[in-house]
Amino acid sequence: MCLGIPGRIVEVGEVRGLRMAKVSFGGIQKAVCLEYLTDAKVGEWVLVHVGFALSRIDEAEARRIFEFLKEFGEMEDLEAEADAAEQAAADAESESESESESEAEAEAEAESDAEAVADTASATATASASASATDTASASATDTASATDTASASASASDTASASDTASASDTASEPVAAAPGGSGRVSS
Amino acid sequence: MKYLDEYRDGEAVTAAAGKLAEIVTQPWVLMEVCGGQTHSIVKHGLDALFPEEVELVHGPGCPVCVTPLSMIDRAHAIASKPGVVFCSFGDMLRVPGSRGDLLALKSRGADVRIVYSPLDAVRIAEENPDRDVVFFAIGFETTAPANAMAAKVAKARGLTRFSLLVSHVLVPPMITSILQASDNRVQAFLGPGHVCTVMGLGEYTPIAARYQVPIVVTGFEPLDLVDGVRRAVEQLEAGRGEVDNAYGRAVRRDGNPEGRRVMDEVFEVCDRSWRGVGNIPKSGLSLRYEYRDYDAARRFEVEDIETREPEACISGRVLRGLAKPDECPEFRSNCTPEHPLGATMVSSEGACAAYFAYGRPQKLVPLGRVR
């Protein structure tokens, strides 16, 4: 549960005195508490731990390692590739989601991208939740997958969903379960 | 930028590893503190990319692994009580205590629920005012602000039947204890990137200065890790021992001050026993006096349970960087994730579980072909 997951804020508001946000993780949205990052705004990327945004992701800092490598001529065309990454990653997510064997999800996913609108994302979340509930052989595996973060989920996801081996695929696979409305407990029951 | 895939690009990772090979002249032992970092290293086969002079040993930063057996038994005992709703992060459920795991307890009818956020446990308490709802508050400084907020919100909303079973651990006392051990091999640390999003760099500066050890706060993606190793080796080769931030996109120098404020409001530092390691002074958090009514350990009387770890298990040595998982004769034979003997196999974030899961490292996929 120590792993943070980067996501983009799509909505901010207040729920019963708590600053909350809807954060999109590759098209899957979920509620995140903003009490520790109260000035975070829509469109910003944040790092989320167990439902709390703890840090804003600094884009300039994020690019520094690539600039370092470029400076030493270690990589050619790196910047161009980094820009292409956004598209590639969006494709990757659609692809990995489509492996979740759910018709509803396939429909939802057609419209889904990083900027997915609310209803699309919740459809995806529901579809994936049901997919994972049925896919998984035992309740135990579902339980484990549902509330854990990337590290353990990546292990579970590769076992249960036989998704692709890339880490991004397992990240994506892990998120919908956690994002299921009403909490993961419902998925497991 | 999507902040994930770019940092998994095989070409960039190879390029960064090339920079590392250029600067290393002698053998060094580095420890990555976090279980998540261990996983990324083993999963992507990064250690194979490093020059042979660089040895990585795996650290204690797996909260599930280090939660003491006695605490798991206590959780078990509380969750067994009639009327209790026991809420936990999912990865605690499979951890075997002396009397089995929480999942088995759930299958026998106990109301054990998985929550993603501690606020989910608060919501469950609100929805079930006639039930005792207990949240298993574990983790490092990453989960502490969230768990603290759950206690604060529950108190503000007057939820008298909500409580927390707290078993929080802190990173700096643990790495100090590693450095102080007479058999220590670690010469530099890849610091805990996500812990530092909360804590900042401040508490690591005196450790680096006192022990003359580089502490490079590092992220979790392949490129982050290779860059963190390079920066640490750069310091080692130059004879420096400083705190460096290689995870600048997420870690600010002062961390998250508001998160720390609420942590301090709810929790205080206490001695804590680490599974596989033993007691480390001032290495944990417990609820402050003002929150004593929310302390599940006070609310539910549980008799002392005698706990025993299998003698064959070397997880204590693994957690302190003195042994690698595959050096254990029980690894893969008598010890598997299904039937773990000890701490580092029980959680998927544990080093033994990582070795088990990714016995054959994955090949890095160059960007553009990332699926």
Image (spheres, coloured by chain):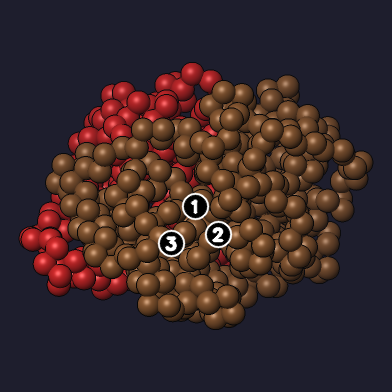
- The answer as to whether the residues below labels 2 and 1 share one chain is yes
Residue highlighted by disc 1 = B57
- The answer as to whether the residues below labels 2 and 3 share one chain is yes
Mark sitting on residue B185: 2
Say what amino acid the circle numbered 2 marks.
Answer: Arg
Q: Nearer the viewer, residue B214 or A147?
A: B214
Residue B103 sits in which quadrant? top right
Residue B248 sits in which quadrant? bottom left
Query: Residue B185: x and y, percent?
Result: 55, 59
Q: Secondary structure at mark 2?
A: loop
Query: Residue B96: x and y, percent?
Result: 69, 33
Q: Is residue B315 above or below residue A68?
A: above
Q: Residue at x 25, y 54 (%)?
A: B13
In front of the other: label 1 or label 3?
Answer: 3
Q: Residue at x 70, y 47 (%)?
A: B275
Q: Which chain is brown?
A: B
Residue highlighted by disc 3 = B28
Separation of disc 2 and disc 3 at Cα?
9 Å
Q: Secondary structure at mark 3?
A: strand
Determine the colour of chain A. Answer: red
